[in-house]
Amino acid sequence: METDEKVTYCVYLELEPYLRQWVIHYCGGVTPVSFPKNSIENIHLANGLIKRPGNVGAEVITPDLLEIAIPEFKAKDPATYNYLPKPARFELIRTIRRNFRLDLWSNLHRFGWIGRRRDKLIEAYMIANGIEVDDTNTNTILKIYQRAYKTFLENKNFQRRKTKKNK
C-alpha cells in the first residue's frame, strides 16, 4: 500500500526563545517553519546544504530548537542534501537576527511614539509578534532596542558634526 505523503526534511537551529518565537510567528505560526519563497533565508539554505557526512549522526531534537523545513531546490534534493554545516548555520542565524533587529527598529522607532514608555511599546511589540512576554525576553529585546537607539543617536550626532565642519 503506497502513501502519497511527502517526507519533510528539516534542519534545526538553536536560537534564543524570543528569536525562535518571532521566527515561528513571522513564518505563519506553524512548525516546521518554511521561509518565504526567494527569501534570503532560503538562499542561505540553498547555498549551505550539503550531503550529510558519514561521521555525523542524526541530530538530537529538543523542544527549544527551531525546526526549519528544507524546501525543494532545483539542484538539491532534500532527501540527499539535508545537512547544514556550522558556518552555514552561523550565516542563517545571523540573517535571522538581522531581520529581527530590522523589524524591531522599524516597528518601535516612530516619531509619534516619542515620550511613551519603551517597556510598554516593547510588550505590545512582543504580543503582536508571537513572543512570550516574560522578564528574560522583555529585557533582552529592550537591550537590543537600546543598543540600536544609541547607535542611531551616535550616527545622527556624527552627521551633524560633519555638516557643521563643511560649512
Image: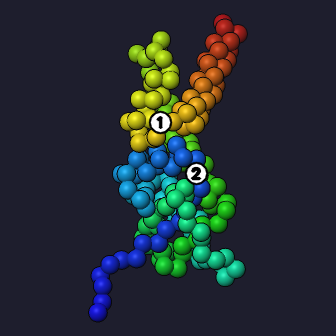
Which amino acid lies under the numbered mark 1 shown in the image of this protein?
A: Val
Which amino acid lies under the numbered mark 2 shown in the image of this protein?
A: Leu
Residue 127: quarter of image: top left
- Is 39 displayed left or right of 53 in the figure? left
Q: Which residue corresponds to mark 1?
A: 133
Query: SS of the residue at dot 2?
Result: loop
Q: Which residue corresponds to mark 2?
A: 15
Mark nearest the camera among 2 and 1 is: 1
Q: Position of residue 139 (x, y in %)?
A: 58, 31
Label 1 packing within 10 angstroms: few (<14), some (14-19), many (20+): some
Q: Position of residue 141 (x, y in %)?
A: 55, 33
Q: Residue at 66%, 8% (x, y): give it.
A: 164
Q: Considering depth in this image, is 96 or 43 the residue closer to the camera? A: 96
Q: Residue at 29%, 93% (x, y): give it.
A: 1
Distance Cα–Cα, label 2 vs label 1: 17 Å
The vertical placement of 77 against 104, above or below, is: below
Q: Earlier in the sequence, mark 2 or mark 1?
A: 2
